[in-house]
Image (cartoon, grey):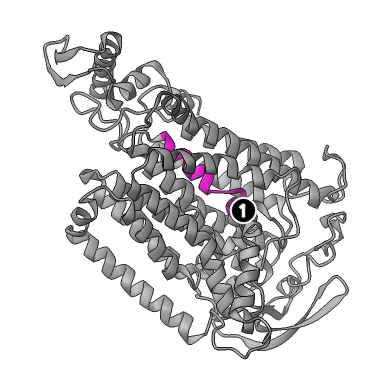
Amino acid sequence: MRHWLVAGLAPGTWTPRRVWLTAFLAFFILSAAWALASPLTSVPDEPWHMVKAAATVRGQLHGTPITVITHNGTVTNHVPMTGYRLPTAYSFLTNLHECYFNNAHVPASCARSLSALPGTALAGSTAGSNNPVYYLAVGWPSLLSHGPLGMYGMRMVSAALSAAMLASAMVTAFQWSRKRRYPMAAVLAAATPMVLFLNGSVNPNSLEATSAILLWTAVLSLLTDPQPELVPRLLARAGIATMALLCVRQLGPAWAVVIVVCAALAAQSGALRDVIRRPAVWLWTGAVGVVALGSIAWTAKFNVLGTGGATTHPSLTFAVAAKHTFGQSVVYLRQMVGYFGWLDVQPPFHLAELWFVPVLALMAAAALVGKRRDVAALALLAFSVIAIPVLAQGRQAASLGYIWQGRYLLAVAAGLPLLAAAILAKREARGDRLKRAVPRLPVAVTGVTLVLGLLMFYTTLRRYAAGSSGSLVLWGTAWTPPGTIVGVVVLYLVGAGLAALVVLKSWAPYPGAGVGGGDGVAEGAPTAGDAAASATVAMVAAQALHDRAAVVGEGANGSAGPASVVGEETSDEDRGAAAVASGTPL
């Protein structure tokens, strides 16, 4: 283990495989910490997704219509649900969180203590008509244990699936041909605390958001940073991400279209045409098309979107609902960052609002350095984040009421920092002030997002353990998460440390910056030839940086080196090679 860590910190030793594994561990640990810190069913709709998952893996795709009584404070509701015959513990999930819901001063210790009870009972779910693919993937731990252990197991499986998506997004950013720190930091910014919170639960919204982040990075890499040798892998990542996005939630097809259109608008000239010409594109398009047709058919057959229902709110015309929704736009943006629990646990000290500072900094810098087409793509995406809820809820409010939540649009909004980072990676800043400020953004974004994420995690844990008015020092609290409070906080710190490590310390030369084949992105451990190539490049770059007018011809050992002219401005490759040699994050 010690040798692995030492090797990971050495310049030029990181490979895509190591980046993926480290990023997977980071995101899985962060998500697992949220899974342990959040009481069972304290996540939106989780009791019904747990019931649906447990039923699906038992072959119960269609249940029995039942009515379940729920309580919201003093209000009693009779909710129509789909009932499934499951182990008895699942019948208590719907009402498990009600004693502390919307009462921030009451810790989660008031909830019933679950155990693996004998026998079976009818358990209700409002997710009965949902596509079963996600539930098949995460529900199998419920077969191993009929109580809380199986429920936490489902959370961990969901966390692992989402962590795999985010790790693939991170390695895609790592393989950028230049300025990789921008997209790598943007992946952290896109994986908001709300994303990690959902990752640690049984809710298909988590896989929807993380697969969209992977799709954003893969498509942006294909179109804004074309590298022919990486196209097959990028197409595979984009294809897998798209199929997951299409399956897990009913609006997946719409989100996939928005992502591809915005990325295409920011594409380099001719990049889209070159990608479309590849036969592999059409193979993946066919596979995605089959999945899309199946998903759309399921949604239409079971009316998952709830369209065409009776008008139960006649006063909510399109104009009225659209105006109300537009007025809630800022609230929806905050919810994308961190309204935890059933939207009843809001971070104190404006922590959610502070998250927008690094994201807006990325977007502002991209608008300043990008061309008109880049800015148009960014503006279209920002407009979509505001307009989509207005149109969607305006259309459905008469039959469904006001149901929109910010997390529903995470798949689209995650593209804001990622698109901005892609623009910054392909454009050069103009003006001395921008040239000094813009390169500092990756470190600033990484630091701010990780610190804010930790604070939101801790304050949410405090709310459940001691109530919002409890002591800031969580000692002897009324509720204790599995693994103890100290254990889950340490777990989160380990995950955050690994995330910082992979973004800021995963060194490797850029493609084309090496001599003799050491491009730093090939699979496998670095060879002696890679090290020698990196050393040669470092000497070339150092000489270029010293006199700013050097023509590099023959290497010191007599081998032919790349002929390049370094004039008044040093090239990105020279700066990258010099940074590799000196240990400076690229």
Q: Dot 1: few (<14), some (14–19), or many (≥20) neighbours within 10 Å? A: many
Is 334 on the left or on the right of 113, as rendered? Answer: left
Element type at mark 1: helix
Q: Where does residue 250 sit, x and y in percent of width and height? A: 49, 73
Q: Quadrant of residue 339?
A: bottom right
Q: Where does residue 21 sit, x and y in percent of width and height? A: 45, 41
Residue at 43% over, 43% down: 367
- The amino acid type of the residue labelled 1 equals Met
Q: Where does residue 28 sit, x and y in percent of width and height? A: 55, 47
* Extent of the magenta region: 181-196
Name the residue nearer the viewer: 397 or 121.
397
Name the residue nearer the viewer: 259 or 96.
259
Q: Where does residue 415 sit, x and y in percent of width and height? A: 46, 52
Q: Main secondary structure of the magenta part?
A: helix
Seen in the picture, residue 185 relative to 395 is either above or below; the reply is above
Residue that carries the numbered disc 1 in the rendered image: 194
Can you say which quadrant of the picture contains the C terminus? Answer: top left
Number of numbered tags placed on the structure image: 1
Is residue 423 on the magenta stretch? Answer: no
Residue at 82% over, 40% down: 474
Seen in the picture, residue 482 relative to 61 is either above or below; the reply is above
